[in-house]
Image (spheres, grey):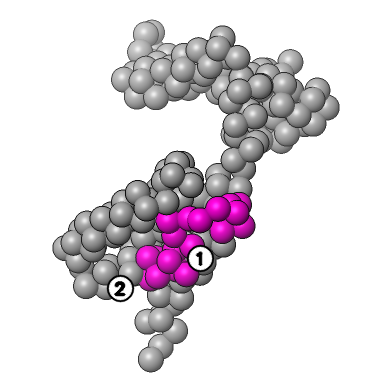
Amino acid sequence: MTWQLIEPFLVALAIGLLLGLERERSHTRKLPAGSRSFALLSLAGAVAASFGPWAIAVVSLGVGALVALAYFRTSKEDPGTTTATAALVAYLLGALAYSRPALAVALAVVVASLLVSKARIHRFARDIITEVELEDAIKFLVIAFVILPLLPDRGLGPYGVLNPEKVWLLVVLLTGIGWVGYIGVRALGPERGLLITGVAGGFVSASATTASMG
C-alpha cells in the first residue's frame, strides 16, 4: 500500500475532523452531527469518489437523508441549519479530496474560517454595513460580474487604442479597492483599515491602489 493510495482518505478524515471539532467547540447543545460523524461523512465521500461519479450521487442522497433526519431530531434545541449544511459540505470535500486533495484542504480551511467567524460576520452585517453600503456593494458586483464579461476584449477606435474590457477592468479595480478601503476603515479603524487595504490592493494592482487611495 503506497502513500498516494491512502493520502486522499487521510486528507478526507482530517477535513471531517477539522469541521466537526469546530462545530462541537462552538456549541454546548446537542448537535445533529459531531466530530466523529463529520469525519465519517468526509471519509464516505472519499470512498464514494473512488468508485466513480455515480457512487458520489447515490451516497449523496443517503447522506442528505441522514443529515435531514438528524436535524429534525435536534431542531428544537438548535434550530440553525449551519451544522447540517456543514456536514453536507464535509461529505463533498471528502469526495473532492480523492482527486484533488490540495484543493479540498484549502476549501476546508475557508469553510472552517467562515464557521469560526460567526460572531464577526454577524457583527459586520448588522453593525458595520449600512443599507447604503450594501447597495453600493451590489452595484459593484454588477459592474464587475455582469457588465465586465459582456464587454469586447479587442481594440476599438482610431488605431485600436481603446480596449473596452481593459478600461472597464480599471474602473472595477478602482471601485473595488475604494470600497474595500472604506469598509476596512469602518471595521478596523483608520490606521489598520488603510494598511490592510494598501497591502491587499498592492497584490492586485499597485497603480490602481495608489490612484484609489490617493
Closer to the eye: label 1 or 2: 1
Residue span colored magenta: 24-43
Residue 200 location, quadrant = top right
Residue 99: x %, y % from top left: 34, 66
Frontmost residue, 102 versus 118: 118
Using a 10 Å C-alpha cutoff, classify the residue at mark 2 as few (fewer than 14 neighbours), some (14 to 19) or many (20 or more): many
Q: Is residue 207 above or below residue 48?
A: above
Q: Secondary structure at mark 1?
A: helix
Q: Amino acid at mark 1?
A: Ser
Is 84 positioned to the left or the right of 28 in the image? left
Residue 213: x %, y % from top left: 71, 19
Mark 1 — residue? 35
Task: Report the quarter where the N terminus lies.
Answer: bottom left
Q: Is residue 25 magenta?
A: yes
Frontmost residue, 174 versus 111: 111
Q: Are marks 1 and 2 in contact (CB under 8 Å)?
A: no
Residue 153: x %, y % from top left: 35, 24
Frontmost residue, 85 versus 213: 85
Q: Secondary structure at mark 2?
A: helix
Mark 2 — residue? 47
Q: Is residue 123 above or below residue 36?
A: above
Say which residue appears at 63% left-offset and 28% top-offset: 124
